[in-house]
């Protein structure tokens, strides 16, 4: 029999799905509803394997990009939007605080953020990062580069070794550089053992893709 708590959680998840779909349906940057769907699916898998609270993970995964800095006037206004939404739901204070903590600290931020505090935070951050490694990640990267007007590749624009969050966001770069500046570094920034295994396999695929890209560029294959 389903308990009243399970029913409560199911309702919240369903309503939040509809809210997020409406918020992100027109997003052209690779943070659309289907990115959320993938992060939710992966969060469930990781939470199950790692023994994390699935409800908190799914709720945070659903809402993590609604508060994204790039899609809001500021980080604060994005977080307020999520906080306001949670207040209208039957989410208890502790769950609400936990979800807000996860989504306010999980962003990559040019690699400058401290480690996630809780297992649930680690799980959702891993799930989001896994969507930036592998076959789908390649597609997202070219989509995003096109959206901000970056070329696929330019040998004269070299990848930057280190950069501030502002430089990371605003300097002219290329889609291929993004692999070196961020995506190929992600596998060493994964929190859980379960996600690490998935990341390593996806990383290899992406590395082979980039190697092949350079060979084709020079007409060698
Ligand atoms: P986060 O919010 O985790 O810091 P982003 O939202 O910056 O990550 O990036 C999400 C995805 O968008 C990346 O995995 C990548 O595929 C794409 N992306 C972000 N920035 C760039 C960029 N400068 N060039 C190409 N793709 C990018
Ligand atoms: Ni995301």
Image (cartoon, rainbow, N blue to C red):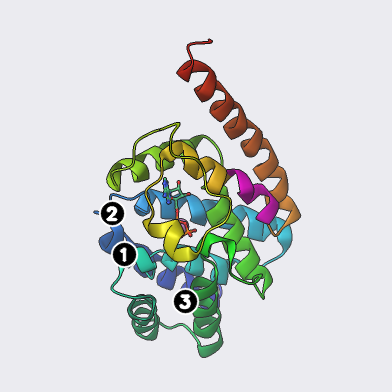
Q: In this view, does 79 lie to the left or right of 186?
A: left
Residue 208, which numbered label?
none
Where is mark 1, residue-wise? 71
Q: In the image, residue 131 lies at what x, y percent? A: 52, 48
Write down the region rendered in magenta: 184-189
- For label 1, the crowd category at 10 Å Cα-Cα, with few meaning under 14, some 14 to 19 and many 20 or more, is some
Q: What element carries label 1?
A: helix
Is residue 53 visible in the rendered image? The answer is: no
The structure residue drawn at horizontal position 63% and vertical position 69%, both measured from the top left corner, is 120
> Residue lying furthest bottom in this view?
93
Point out which mark residue 8 bears.
3
Question: Mark 2 or mark 1, which is nearer the start of the sequence?
Answer: 2
Q: Distance between the residues labelled 3 and 2?
A: 29 Å
Label 2: how many residues lie within 10 Å, few (<14), some (14-19) or many (20+)? few
Provide the major secondary structure of the magenta segment.
Answer: helix
Q: Residues within 10 Å of mark 3 (few under 14, many from 20)?
A: few
Q: Which of marks 3 and 2 is nearer the N terminus?
A: 3
Q: Which mark is residue 27?
A: 2
Res. 11 image quadrant: bottom left
Is residue 186 in the magenta section? yes
Compared with 176, 18 (above or below) is below
């Amino acid at each position: 029999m389903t308990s009243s708590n399970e029913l409560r959680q199911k309702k919240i998840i369903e309503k939040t799905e509809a809210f997020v779909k409406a918020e992100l349906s027109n997003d052209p940057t690779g943070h659309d509803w289907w990115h959320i769907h993938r992060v939710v699916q992966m969060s469930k898998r990781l939470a199950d394997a790692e023994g994390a609270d699935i409800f908190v993970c799914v709720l945070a995964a659903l809402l993590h990009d609604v508060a994204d800095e790039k899609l809001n006037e500021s980080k604060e206004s994005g977080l307020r939007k999520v906080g306001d939404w949670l207040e209208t739901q039957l989410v208890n204070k502790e769950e609400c605080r936990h979800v807000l903590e996860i989504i306010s600290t999980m962003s990559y931020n040019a690699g400058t953020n401290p480690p996630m505090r809780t297992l649930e935070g680690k799980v959702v951050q891993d799930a989001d990062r896994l969507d930036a490694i592998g076959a789908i990640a390649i597609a997202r990267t070219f989509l995003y580069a096109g959206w901000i007007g970056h070329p696929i590749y330019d040998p004269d624009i070299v990848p930057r070794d280190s950069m501030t969050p502002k430089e990371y966001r605003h300097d002219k770069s290329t889609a291929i550089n993004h692999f070196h500046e961020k995506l190929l570094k992600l596998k060493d920034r994964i929190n859980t053992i379960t996600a690490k295994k998935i990341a390593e396999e996806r990383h290899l695929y992406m590395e082979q893709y980039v190697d092949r890209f350079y060979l084709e560029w020079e007409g060698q294959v």
